Image (spheres, rainbow, N blue to C red):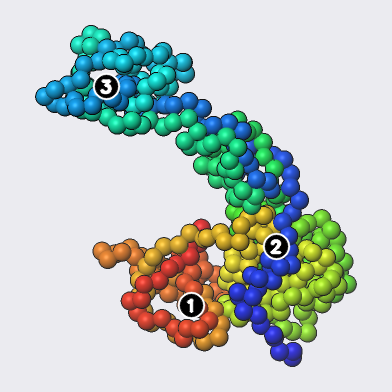
């Protein structure tokens, strides 16, 4: 049996970035761009806001007209009207003011707004009981975004705040990197479709496929499923070649363990150059993972055990999808701080991912390890997240503060 040459996780991430490139850009409507990464730098074509505006409900004033005013000696101002939302404000002179609402346009020449609760109105006479400084309660033209400045750089991932900002600039479409299309195969003669109502002796349902589809869809990828490949090399290779022509990223679930009937590694080397990049990762669970570069298309061979398969895809499959989708190198998974409930031992030299249950208590959140073999689905379903034990560590002590990567 051939010994597996393993690669450190940090080196796997570097190989992914060095070997694969973002997909070609495409133009999409702004409202369809959520979760995508920009393939261009966007500069503001106008000032935001496009006029001086109030940040409170109050009276637009010349700040100097309120200097020295207070509870005992109010400033007296003449109100000449109200600025209606969406309309141009009238001009005011010294000693005058104008009622404005939050977001309303300031009259020409005014340089501050006194909050309405600091005033008292008697007809058109307004008493100001406090002084305001120039610029107080005002956002000036271009203070948020200045015309000509770069507001978003290439590879920036668009979320709701970015989409709203672009809409405020009148931008209705953007150039983003194309969504990756992922081809999935399951492999192994023991597998049957998960829709199967009954099983023959020795058969198991393919539980990995629907779980992996969900993870891929969360990562904004499109999915093509090729079914279950038989343990016949010619068929395995032929179907894999056909699928790779249609997709940007090919994933095999199962068949990555070292064995005489394992065709995944051999197939990867036949699909394109340079072929196999990784033939094992120094990680637990998920050590027998394969990654190849087949004519600049990534091919990932996942372990067959469900825990290992989902673990690896959530870490390295995600990294590949992010690379293809043009996301920045560092995209952080949601985490929560917790305290470890018990001692955990770990073998030095490999990164270990431990499944945990999170339980709130009067001191915060406790992380309770869930142990079980890599093929046990129940332990995966029970877990709320993953605790990462670094390769240089030999374990963690009960009571240690830890960061937990959350499963969705």
Question: Real-space Cα distance between discs 1 and 2?
Answer: 35 Å
Residue located at (39% from left, 65% from top): 337
Question: Real-space Cα distance between discs 1 and 3?
Answer: 65 Å
Q: Which quadrant holds residue 279?
A: bottom right
Relative vertical location of residue 52 with respect to residue 148 in this rendering, above or below = above
Can you name the residue that lies furthest to the top here? 123
Residue 47's x, y, as percent? 54, 31
Mark 3, residue position: 65
Relative vertical location of residue 169 with respect to residue 406 in this rendering, above or below = above
**Left of 64 or right of it: where is 282?**
right
Task: Give whichever of discs 1 and 2 has the lower sequence position.
Answer: 2
Task: Give whichever of discs 2 and 3 has the lower sequence position.
Answer: 3
Residue located at (30% from left, 26% from top): 63
Residue located at (17% from left, 21% from top): 74
Q: Is residue 160 visible?
A: yes
**Left of 230 or right of it: where is 36?**
left
Q: Is residue 234 or residue 393 the one in the foreground? A: 393
Local crowd size for mark 2, using a 10 Å CA cut-off: few (<14), some (14–19), many (≥20): some
Q: Are marks 2 and 3 in contact (CB under 8 Å)?
A: no
Is disc 2 placed on a helix, strand or loop? loop
Q: Which mark is residue 193?
A: 2
Mark 1, residue position: 389
Task: Give whichever of discs 1 and 3 has the lower sequence position.
Answer: 3
Is disc 1 placed on a helix, strand or loop? strand
Residue 232's x, y, as percent? 84, 74
Q: Is residue 314 or residue 152 the one in the foreground? A: 152
Residue 251's x, y, as percent? 72, 65
Q: Are marks 1 and 2 in contact (CB under 8 Å)?
A: no
Q: Which mark is residue 95?
A: none
């Amino acid at each position: 049996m051939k010994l597996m040459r393993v690669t450190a996780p940090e080196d796997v991430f570097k190989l992914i970035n060095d070997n694969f490139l973002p997909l070609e850009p495409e133009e999409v409507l702004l409202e369809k761009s959520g979760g995508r990464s920009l393939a261009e730098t966007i500069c503001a074509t106008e000032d935001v806001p496009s006029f001086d505006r109030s940040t409170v409900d109050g009276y637009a004033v010349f700040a100097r007209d309120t200097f020295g005013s207070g509870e005992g000696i109010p400033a007296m101002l003449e109100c000449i009207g109200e600025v209606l939302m969406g309309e141009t404000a009238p001009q005011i002179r010294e000693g005058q003011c104008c009622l404005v609402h939050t977001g309303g346009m300031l009259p020409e020449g005014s340089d501050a707004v006194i909050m309405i609760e600091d005033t008292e109105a008697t007809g058109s006479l307004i008493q100001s009981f406090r002084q305001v400084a120039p610029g107080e309660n005002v956002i000036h033209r271009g203070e948020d975004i200045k015309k000509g400045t770069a507001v978003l750089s290439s590879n920036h991932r668009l979320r709701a705040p970015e989409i709203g900002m672009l809409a405020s600039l009148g931008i209705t479409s953007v150039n983003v990197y194309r969504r990756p299309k992922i081809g999935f195969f399951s492999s192994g003669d023991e597998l049957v479709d998960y829709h199967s109502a009954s099983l023959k002796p020795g058969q198991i349902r393919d539980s990995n496929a629907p779980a992996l589809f969900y993870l891929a869809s969360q990562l904004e990828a499109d999915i093509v499923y090729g079914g279950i490949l038989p343990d016949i090399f010619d068929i395995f290779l032929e179907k894999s070649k056909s699928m790779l022509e249609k997709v940007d990223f090919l994933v095999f679930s199962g068949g990555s363990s070292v064995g005489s009937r394992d065709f995944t590694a051999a197939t990867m080397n036949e699909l394109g150059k340079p072929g196999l990049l990784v033939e094992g990762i120094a990680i637990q669970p998920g050590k027998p993972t394969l990654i190849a570069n087949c004519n600049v298309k990534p091919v990932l061979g996942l372990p067959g055990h469900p825990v290992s398969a989902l673990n690896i895809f959530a870490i390295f499959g995600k990294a590949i999808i992010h690379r293809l989708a043009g996301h920045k190198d560092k995209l952080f998974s949601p985490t929560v701080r917790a305290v470890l409930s018990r001692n955990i031992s770990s073998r030095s030299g490999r990164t270990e991912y431990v499944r945990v249950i999170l339980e709130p208590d009067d001191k915060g959140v406790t992380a309770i390890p869930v142990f079980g073999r890599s093929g046990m689905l129940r332990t995966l379903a029970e877990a709320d997240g993953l605790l990462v034990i670094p390769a240089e560590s030999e374990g963690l002590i009960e009571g240690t503060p830890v960061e937990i990567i959350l499963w969705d």
